[in-house]
Amino acid sequence: MRTVSLRSEIAEQPEVLARLLEAGPAEARESAPGLARATHLTFAARGSSDHAATYGKYLFEIVVGVVAASAAPSVITRYGAVPDFRHGAVIGISQSGSAPDVAAVVSAARAGGAYTLAVTNAPRSRLARAAEARLLLRCGPERAVAATKTYTASCLAVALLASAAATVRGRAALSFDGVVAAVEEAVGSEKDAAQLARRIGRGRMLVVLGRGYDYAAALEGALKIKELARVWAEPYSSADFAHGPRTLLDRGTAVLVFASRGSMAAEARRTVGALRERGARVYAITNDAALADRCDDAVLLERRVGEAVAPIALSVVAQHLARAVALRHGRDPERPAGLSKVTRTL
C-alpha cells in the first residue's frame, strides 16, 4: 500500500487538475449565468482558500469585468450585521467545506438574494449545503496537514468559473492549454527547489513578493513556508512593499519573488534589480528567463502557459520549496507544529 505524504500529494497534482479540467467546465457553465449577471462578487474563505480567493479577485475583475471583494466573516458571525448582498454573487471556498464562518457568509448571502456557489472538495459538507450551486474539486482525500492539491484545484476551479462567466458576458474565455504540463514540470522541480532552499539558507526571515495574478502565489508560498518551516515569511504585493516596508531591507536580506511572463514581467525585472542594488539576496520562482538571470538563484519553469493560469504552476514549486526549507530547519513537514488539517473559526 502506497504511503501518503506531503510529497506524494504534491506529486498527485497533474492528475487532480486533469480530472478537474475534464469534469469541472460543465459545472462552471451551469453556474456562469448566475455569476455573469451579478453586479458585484464577494469571496468568503480562510487560509489557503483565501489565497485562492485573492487569485479569483484578479480573475473576475480582469477577465469577467465585475468588481470583486473578500468578505469579513466576523461581520456576520460576531457582529451580527448582514451586508446587502442583493444583485451580487458570493463564492465560498473551503476544501473541507466545514468552515462555519465561511458557510455563515454564504447562507446569509443566499437568504439576502445573492447567487451563491461553493467551491469545495466535500460534496455533503456544510458549505456545499449552504450554497445554491457547487463546483467540486474532485481531489480525493488530502491527508497532509498543509494544503497542496486542494489549493491548486481551488485556483483552477475559480479560473474555470471566471472563464465561463466571461463567455456569458461576451468576453474572451481563458485558455487552459498547457496547464497540466506546466504543473507536471513544477512537480519535477523538487531538486531545483531544494537547491533554492540551500541558497536561501537558515535565516529566520524571508520577504516574499508578487504582483497581479502572482500575488496569490506569493501569499500561498509564504504561508507554506511559515506552516512547514516556522520561518517568518512575510508576503507583500511588490507595489505595497515599495510604499514603506522596503525600509526593512538590510544588506543580505533574503527576498523570494514570484513572477510570470506577461503584464507584470518588466516591472518584476526592475524590482529585482532595485532589490539587489539595496544589497538584498534575491531569489525567484518564475517562468521568465530574463528575470531568472537577474536573480541570485531561481527555479525557472520553461513550459509556456497563459499569464492568468501560470501562478498555479508557480505555487507547486513553492510547495517543494517550503518542504525543503522545513527540512533544512530540522522541521517535520508532515507534522507542522500547532496545526491540524481542518481549522474551524467563527
Image (cartoon, rainbow, N blue to C red):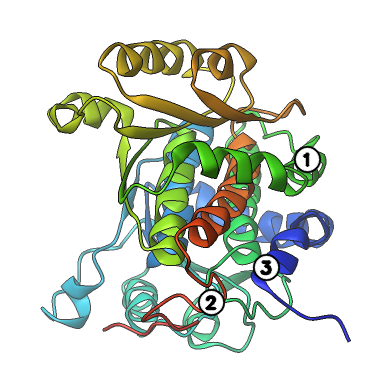
Marks 2 and 3: CB-CB under 8 Å? no
Disc 3 marks a residue whose amino acid type is Leu
Secondary element under disc 3, as helix, strand or loop, is loop
Q: Nearer the viewer, mark 1 or mark 3?
A: 1
Front in this rendered view, residue 295 or 52? 295
Q: Position of residue 250 (x, y in %)?
A: 20, 28
Residue tagged 2? 145
207 relative position to 23: left or right? left
Q: Position of residue 207 (x, y in %)?
A: 32, 39
Front in this rendered view, residue 142 or 160? 142
Query: Can you say which quadrant of the picture contains the N terminus?
Result: bottom right
The mark nearer the N terminus, 2 or 1, is 2
Front in this rendered view, residue 273 or 102? 273
Secondary element under disc 2, as helix, strand or loop, is loop
Residue tagged 3? 137
263 relative position to 208: left or right? right
Residue tagged 1? 185
Q: CA distance from mark 1 to mark 3?
A: 21 Å
Other-residue count near label 1 (Cα within 10 Å), few / some / many at <14 / 14–19 / ≥20 = some
Other-residue count near label 2 (Cα within 10 Å), few / some / many at <14 / 14–19 / ≥20 = some
Disc 2 marks a residue whose amino acid type is Val
Q: Position of residue 76 (x, y in %)?
A: 20, 77
Disc 1 marks a residue whose amino acid type is Glu
The mark nearer the N terminus, 1 or 3, is 3
Q: CA distance from mark 2 to mark 1?
A: 24 Å
Relative to 231, is 92 above or below? below
Relative to 238, is 147 above or below? below
